[in-house]
Amino acid sequence: MAAGVRLVVLGKQGAGKGTQCVRLSHRYAVPHISTGDMLRAAVRSRTELGIIADDLMKSGELLPDELIANMVGERLDEPDAASRGFLLDGYPRTVVQAELLDAILDGQPLNCVINLEVPTDLVLTRLVSRRTCVDCGAIYSTSQPPAQGWVCDNCGGEVVQRPDDTAEAIMTRLQAYERQTFPLIDFYTERGLVETIDGSASPDEVFTATIAAIERRRKGA
Ligand code: ADP
């Protein structure tokens, strides 16, 4: 089995983080930890966290940093992540969250931070046509739907348009990315961790470039 990895994946909404993380998770046998997927599951099961998250998520606003850090900290303590590593998708999203992640990792280094770069006009086109499985989070689009109606190929779940993939919530999320998440590129560049990948290429090409970057890091090149 390939060695594990510890990665943070950054990129605007619609940059392809989810799609690439699913592939990377199989390649390196590490869990894909998506804070958005975890929160959507909490909303569906009406947990205390889900009730707090619901309205903020629908409007495209971020949840409080400490709350998310606790959720991520607990997930990273589970045996799969503790033994093999992780792919963090959607976390950290603010400088405060990155500092909290440092505290959670307690000196364990990241292999690198993958920054999927995609122009805003392309992500807007992708988001409007994006459809998502409510159960496993698999991503489809109106031009690449599941094989059988809107039923997920992986798990049989219902495939829908996310409630925050409306024009208004998309704009709020993209603005939050520019204002709060973009500064993380400098934060991690100063630590020499950023690998920027052209996310506008095809999923296969992006995957190949991402693996090459990770392997370069492993060899210390
Ligand atoms: P996207 O990146 O397309 O906005 P996600 O699935 O990553 O979608 O997140 C959906 C929503 O969940 C966010 O708009 C926000 O409300 C909440 N969320 C997810 N991750 C975080 C986080 N790290 N900090 C705060 N809120 C978060």
Image (cartoon, rainbow, N blue to C red):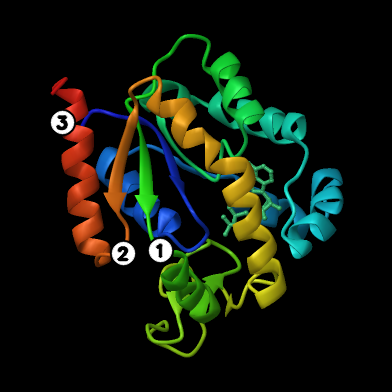
Find disc 1 in the rendering and name its residue.
119
Residue 145 horizontal side relative to residue 50, left or right: left
> In the structure shown, which secondary structural element does the residue marked by tag 1 occupy?
loop
- Which numbered disc, 2 or 1, marks the residue closer to the eye? 1
Q: Amino acid at mark 3?
A: Arg
- The answer to which of 50 and 99 lies nearer the viewer is 99
Mark 2 / mark 3, whichever is N-terminal: 2
- Which numbered disc, 2 or 3, marks the residue closer to the eye? 2
* Relative vertical location of residue 194 with respect to residue 190 in this rendering, above or below: below
Residue 151, given in percent of the width and then of the height, sits at 50, 81
Mark 2 / mark 1, whichever is N-terminal: 1
Residue 220, given in percent of the width and then of the height, sits at 16, 20
Specify few, some or many for label 3: CA neighbours under 10 Å numbering under 14, 14-19, or 20 or more.
Answer: few
Residue 131, given in percent of the width and then of the height, sits at 53, 76
Q: Residue at x 19, y 24 (%)?
A: 218
> In the structure shown, which secondary structural element does the residue marked by tag 2 occupy?
loop
Find disc 3 in the rendering and name its residue.
216
Mark 3 / mark 1, whichever is N-terminal: 1
**Mark-to-mark CA distance, 3 and 1:** 26 Å
Q: Is residue 156 visible?
A: no
Q: Amino acid at mark 2?
A: Ser
- Which numbered disc, 3 or 1, marks the residue closer to the eye? 1
Q: Residue at x 86, y 49 (%)?
A: 52
Q: Residue at x 37, y 53 (%)?
A: 117
Find disc 2 in the rendering and name its residue.
200
Residue 189 horizontal side relative to residue 201, left or right: right
